[in-house]
Image: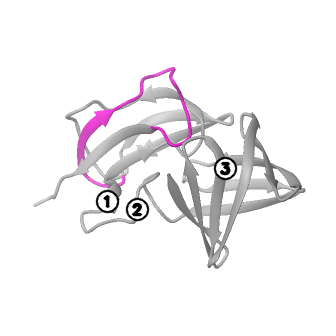
Amino acid sequence: MERTFKFGDKVISVQMSGTTSPIKARIGDREVEWQFEQVSDGEFLFRNAGRQFRLFIAQDKTGATFVQTDGRVYKLTPIDRDFGAGGEDENGGGGTGGGRLIASMPGRIIKVLVEPGQEVEKNQAVLIMESMKMEITQTAAFHGKVEEVNVKAGQQVNAGSLMVRIEPISKV
Protein backbone atom coordinates (compact mmCIF):
# COMPACT_ATOMS: atom_id res chain seq x y z
CA MET A 1 0.00 0.00 0.00
CA GLU A 2 1.26 3.47 -0.79
CA ARG A 3 -0.08 6.67 0.73
CA THR A 4 0.90 10.18 -0.28
CA PHE A 5 0.78 13.05 2.20
CA LYS A 6 1.40 16.77 2.16
CA PHE A 7 3.61 17.96 5.02
CA GLY A 8 3.96 21.73 4.87
CA ASP A 9 5.13 22.37 1.30
CA LYS A 10 6.67 18.87 0.91
CA VAL A 11 5.08 15.74 -0.53
CA ILE A 12 5.84 12.53 1.37
CA SER A 13 5.15 9.12 -0.11
CA VAL A 14 4.96 6.27 2.42
CA GLN A 15 4.98 2.70 1.18
CA MET A 16 4.00 -0.27 3.34
CA SER A 17 3.58 -3.92 2.50
CA GLY A 18 0.64 -4.87 4.70
CA THR A 19 1.37 -4.54 8.38
CA THR A 20 4.87 -5.97 8.31
CA SER A 21 8.23 -4.28 8.64
CA PRO A 22 10.05 -2.57 6.97
CA ILE A 23 8.31 0.66 6.02
CA LYS A 24 9.74 2.87 3.28
CA ALA A 25 9.22 6.61 2.90
CA ARG A 26 10.15 8.79 -0.03
CA ILE A 27 10.59 12.51 0.56
CA GLY A 28 11.50 14.17 -2.71
CA ASP A 29 14.37 12.12 -4.17
CA ARG A 30 15.43 10.71 -0.78
CA GLU A 31 14.21 7.28 0.29
CA VAL A 32 14.51 5.94 3.83
CA GLU A 33 13.62 2.56 5.31
CA TRP A 34 12.78 1.69 8.92
CA GLN A 35 12.11 -1.47 10.86
CA PHE A 36 9.08 -0.99 13.09
CA GLU A 37 6.88 -2.71 15.59
CA GLN A 38 3.52 -1.74 16.99
CA VAL A 39 3.86 -1.34 20.76
CA SER A 40 0.20 -0.55 21.47
CA ASP A 41 -2.81 0.95 19.72
CA GLY A 42 -1.41 4.01 17.92
CA GLU A 43 2.12 3.62 19.34
CA PHE A 44 5.00 2.44 17.17
CA LEU A 45 8.73 1.91 17.69
CA PHE A 46 10.93 2.67 14.65
CA ARG A 47 14.58 1.66 14.16
CA ASN A 48 17.03 2.76 11.47
CA ALA A 49 20.82 2.62 11.35
CA GLY A 50 21.19 2.18 15.10
CA ARG A 51 18.70 4.95 15.92
CA GLN A 52 15.42 4.28 17.64
CA PHE A 53 12.40 6.50 18.13
CA ARG A 54 8.80 6.16 19.26
CA LEU A 55 5.86 7.56 17.25
CA PHE A 56 2.26 8.05 18.34
CA ILE A 57 -0.10 8.19 15.36
CA ALA A 58 -3.75 9.32 15.27
CA GLN A 59 -6.14 10.22 12.49
CA ASP A 60 -9.13 12.55 12.53
CA LYS A 61 -12.37 12.10 10.58
CA THR A 62 -11.10 14.25 7.68
CA GLY A 63 -8.28 11.76 7.07
CA ALA A 64 -5.54 14.04 8.40
CA THR A 65 -2.89 12.07 10.24
CA PHE A 66 -1.14 13.43 13.31
CA VAL A 67 2.26 12.07 14.30
CA GLN A 68 3.78 12.88 17.70
CA THR A 69 7.44 12.22 18.45
CA ASP A 70 9.99 13.89 20.73
CA GLY A 71 7.32 16.18 22.18
CA ARG A 72 6.34 17.63 18.77
CA VAL A 73 3.16 16.98 16.76
CA TYR A 74 3.17 16.94 12.95
CA LYS A 75 0.11 17.03 10.72
CA LEU A 76 0.17 14.99 7.51
CA THR A 77 -2.69 15.68 5.08
CA PRO A 78 -3.49 12.83 2.69
CA ILE A 79 -3.34 13.74 -0.99
CA ASP A 80 -5.04 10.51 -2.07
CA ARG A 81 -8.68 11.02 -1.01
CA ASP A 82 -9.73 7.41 -1.01
CA PHE A 83 -7.48 5.33 1.24
CA GLY A 84 -4.94 3.26 -0.65
CA ALA A 85 -5.97 4.43 -4.11
CA GLY A 86 -4.16 6.72 -6.50
CA GLY A 87 -5.31 10.18 -7.54
CA GLU A 88 -8.82 10.81 -8.75
CA ASP A 89 -9.82 9.92 -12.30
CA GLU A 90 -12.28 11.84 -14.48
CA ASN A 91 -15.23 10.16 -12.71
CA GLY A 92 -13.95 11.19 -9.29
CA GLY A 93 -12.74 7.66 -8.68
CA GLY A 94 -9.36 6.60 -7.42
CA GLY A 95 -7.62 6.08 -10.77
CA THR A 96 -6.30 2.53 -11.09
CA GLY A 97 -7.25 1.98 -7.46
CA GLY A 98 -10.97 2.55 -8.12
CA GLY A 99 -13.12 3.33 -5.10
CA ARG A 100 -11.21 1.26 -2.57
CA LEU A 101 -11.69 2.16 1.07
CA ILE A 102 -8.56 0.73 2.64
CA ALA A 103 -7.82 0.90 6.35
CA SER A 104 -4.95 3.33 6.82
CA MET A 105 -4.32 2.01 10.33
CA PRO A 106 -5.44 -0.90 12.51
CA GLY A 107 -8.89 -0.57 14.04
CA ARG A 108 -12.26 -2.10 14.79
CA ILE A 109 -15.34 -1.79 12.60
CA ILE A 110 -18.20 -0.26 14.60
CA LYS A 111 -20.90 -0.17 11.92
CA VAL A 112 -21.20 -0.97 8.20
CA LEU A 113 -23.72 1.36 6.57
CA VAL A 114 -23.85 -0.12 3.04
CA GLU A 115 -24.25 -3.46 1.31
CA PRO A 116 -23.19 -4.85 -2.08
CA GLY A 117 -25.31 -3.55 -4.95
CA GLN A 118 -26.29 -0.39 -3.09
CA GLU A 119 -25.86 2.96 -4.86
CA VAL A 120 -24.06 5.65 -2.83
CA GLU A 121 -23.65 9.39 -3.26
CA LYS A 122 -20.39 11.31 -2.98
CA ASN A 123 -19.54 11.95 0.72
CA GLN A 124 -22.16 9.43 1.94
CA ALA A 125 -21.08 7.59 5.07
CA VAL A 126 -20.06 4.01 4.20
CA LEU A 127 -18.75 2.67 7.51
CA ILE A 128 -17.66 3.76 10.95
CA MET A 129 -14.48 2.42 12.50
CA GLU A 130 -12.65 3.01 15.74
CA SER A 131 -8.90 3.48 15.80
CA MET A 132 -6.79 4.85 18.63
CA LYS A 133 -9.93 5.66 20.65
CA MET A 134 -11.33 7.82 17.83
CA GLU A 135 -14.42 7.13 15.73
CA ILE A 136 -13.67 7.60 12.04
CA THR A 137 -16.49 7.79 9.49
CA GLN A 138 -15.36 6.59 6.06
CA THR A 139 -17.27 8.19 3.18
CA ALA A 140 -17.70 7.51 -0.52
CA ALA A 141 -15.30 9.59 -2.61
CA PHE A 142 -17.77 9.73 -5.52
CA HIS A 143 -21.22 8.62 -6.74
CA GLY A 144 -21.11 4.87 -7.34
CA LYS A 145 -22.28 1.33 -6.70
CA VAL A 146 -20.96 -0.75 -3.80
CA GLU A 147 -19.28 -3.80 -5.34
CA GLU A 148 -17.66 -5.38 -2.25
CA VAL A 149 -18.07 -5.17 1.50
CA ASN A 150 -15.30 -7.16 3.19
CA VAL A 151 -15.91 -6.21 6.82
CA LYS A 152 -18.62 -6.54 9.46
CA ALA A 153 -19.39 -4.82 12.74
CA GLY A 154 -17.03 -5.88 15.54
CA GLN A 155 -14.29 -7.04 13.15
CA GLN A 156 -10.67 -6.00 13.75
CA VAL A 157 -8.86 -4.78 10.61
CA ASN A 158 -5.17 -4.28 9.90
CA ALA A 159 -3.68 -1.31 8.07
CA GLY A 160 -3.94 -2.05 4.36
CA SER A 161 -7.14 -4.13 4.63
CA LEU A 162 -9.64 -3.57 1.82
CA MET A 163 -12.89 -2.74 3.61
CA VAL A 164 -15.24 -1.61 0.82
CA ARG A 165 -14.95 -1.25 -2.97
CA ILE A 166 -17.16 1.18 -4.87
CA GLU A 167 -17.30 1.46 -8.66
CA PRO A 168 -18.06 4.91 -10.11
CA ILE A 169 -21.40 5.52 -11.80
CA SER A 170 -21.62 8.43 -14.22
CA LYS A 171 -24.48 10.82 -13.57
CA VAL A 172 -26.20 11.65 -16.84
Q: Could you tell me residue 90's position as x and y percent?
A: 25, 69
Inspect the image, locate mark 3, and give the three-letter code of the amino acid beneath it.
Answer: Pro
- For the record, the magenta segment spans 141-161
Nearest the viewer among 26 and 87 is 26
Q: Secondary structure at mark 3?
A: strand
Question: Vertical placement of 91 versus 109: above or below?
Answer: below
Percent x, y of residue 155 = 50, 23
- The amino acid beneath tag 1 is Thr
Q: Which residue position holds label 3?
A: 22
Question: Which residue is at the far front?
Answer: 49
Quadrant of image for the C terminus:
bottom left
Residue 93 shows in this picture? no
Q: How is the image coloured?
A: one colour
| Cβ atoms at labels 1 and 3 below 8 Å apart | no
Q: Between residue 53 and residue 152, name the one nearer to us.
A: 53
In the visual, does 96 lie left or right of 103? left
Q: Earlier in the sequence, mark 1 or mark 3?
A: 3
Q: Taking 143 as reference, is 41 left or right? A: right
Q: Which residue is mark 2?
A: 86
Where is residue 139? Give x, y as percent. Answer: 41, 46
Figure label count: 3
- Crowding at dot 3, Cα within 10 Å, few <14 / some 14-19 / many 20+, comes out as some
Q: First in sequence: mark 2 or mark 3? A: 3
Give the class, few, some or many, for how many residues have Cα within 10 Å of label 2's Cα (few <14, many ≥20).
many
The residue to which callout 1 is attached is: 96
